[in-house]
Amino acid sequence: MKTIVRSFKILGIFILLLGLAYPLFITGIAQATFRHKADGSLIERDGKVVGSVFIGQKFDSAIYFSGRPSATGYGTLPSGASNLSLTSRKLYDEVQERNADFAQRNALSPGDAIPSEMLFASASGLDPHISPMSAFLQLDRVAVARHFSEVQKRELSAVIENMTEKPQFGLLGETRVNVLLLNLRLDEIARKDGR
């Protein structure tokens, strides 16, 4: 009986230390040193949270750049990949459908290469980035849908160039563009010109 009581006392101490004190201590440090990141790198516009820098969203409208497809419908709780193998007929059909849809939406020729991130969902299903090539392939569609002039179109092209992130430390990851940040910048261009 003494051993059981002692075991429960030790369990209680460790629950308090590791389940309460340590998380509160680390949360306090995070809030004091990098609050924005600790709170999820949320982005606000006009006092309203519109998303996070690190979580992809669905943009269906022609007036916005589209992000990567998501195997979970961009749900944050069931995030994950489809887990379909490369030999899966279902995956093949999904990729063919995404290829046709992307080509049709962006008025591409049948021979135009479409970057793989626009055809395959990411491992998390929430990747917020696309390649600069994917952004440039969508540029004409977005400019037409927004009724942009050639000057505005060139400005938007420069925005894509300026928002392109290089691989971290020059070697980790790919060259990429954050879709949410790009679309927010796109709204600013349109608002500036009254569109």
Image: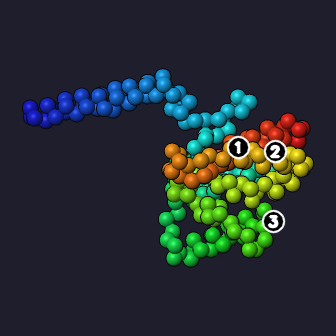
Could you tell which of marks 1 and 3 lies nearer the N-terminus? 3
- Residue tagged 1: 162
| Residue 63 to residue 90: above or below | above
- Residue 15 vs residue 148: left or right? left
Instruction: Specify the amino acid type for callout 3.
Output: Ala
Disc 1 marks a residue whose amino acid type is Asn
The answer to the question of whether label 1 and label 3 lie on touching residues, with beta carbons closer than 8 A, is no
Residue occupying the point 62% across, 64% down: 116
- Tell me the CA gap for discs 1 and 3: 25 Å
- In percent of the image, x 75 and y 40: which residue is there? 185
Label 1: which secondary element = helix
Residue 16 % position (x, y):
30, 28
Indicate whether 111 appears above or below 173: below
Q: Is disc 3 placed on a helix, strand or loop? A: loop
x 65%, y 63%: residue: 115
Is residue 60 in sight in this rendering?
no
Residue at numbered disc 2: 155
Q: Position of residue 195 (x, y in %)?
A: 88, 42
To which residue does mark 3 refer?
A: 107
> Please, what secondary structure does the residue beneath circle 2 have?
helix
Q: Amino acid at mark 2?
A: Glu
Q: Which residue reaches farthest left?
A: 2
The quarter in which the N terminus is drawn is: top left
